[in-house]
Amino acid sequence: MVTDPIADYLTRVRNAIKAKHRIVEVPASNLKKSLTKVLHEKGYILNYKFEETSAQGSIKIALKYDPVSKTSAITKLERVSKPGLRKYCNSEELPRVLNGLGIAVLSTSNGVITDKEARNLKVGGEVLCYVY
């Protein structure tokens, strides 16, 4: 049993990037599916596919690499809010990652969105992770 499924998701992606894998498979949940959609929309991953083979299902993520230098589009994945210490922000104090070059992924009442979208919608929420 995994006590922090989001940290497990980020760790699997981080380890796959270190090992230069093209595809990584993670167990599915609604929050992980939303997080994957945000990463795809912002261009950090190449593609994804939801598979409902077992009771839980899985997510297959195609990682994105630069064709010339073979470096990943994701430099760092950092978990912010943990089960032992949740981190919430209102719309005025949302974090800026690398002065706007990275994204902070938030879980809000409007779903899982980025910090820029949350500022435009003027909503706050739980800061899940930083991606850059």
Image (cartoon, rainbow, N blue to C red):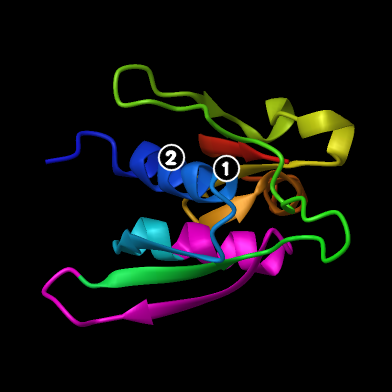
Percent x, y of residue 93: 70, 25
Percent x, y of residue 77: 59, 38
**Residue tagged by mark 2?**
11
Query: Relative to 131, does residue 85 appear above or below in the rendering?
Result: above
Percent x, y of residue 33: 42, 65
**Residue tagged by mark 1?**
18
Q: Secondary structure at mark 1?
A: helix
The number of numbered badges drawn on the structure is 2
Label 1 Cα crowd, 10 Å radius (few <14 / some 14-19 / many 20+) = few
**Residue in front for this viewpoint, 19 or 62:** 19
Quarter of the N terminus within the rendering: top left
Q: Is residue 20 left or right of 119 when viewed as pictured? A: left
**Which amino acid type is marked by label 1?**
Lys
**Which amino acid type is marked by label 2?**
Thr
Q: Residue at x 34, y 41 (%)?
A: 8
Quarter of the C terminus within the rendering: top right
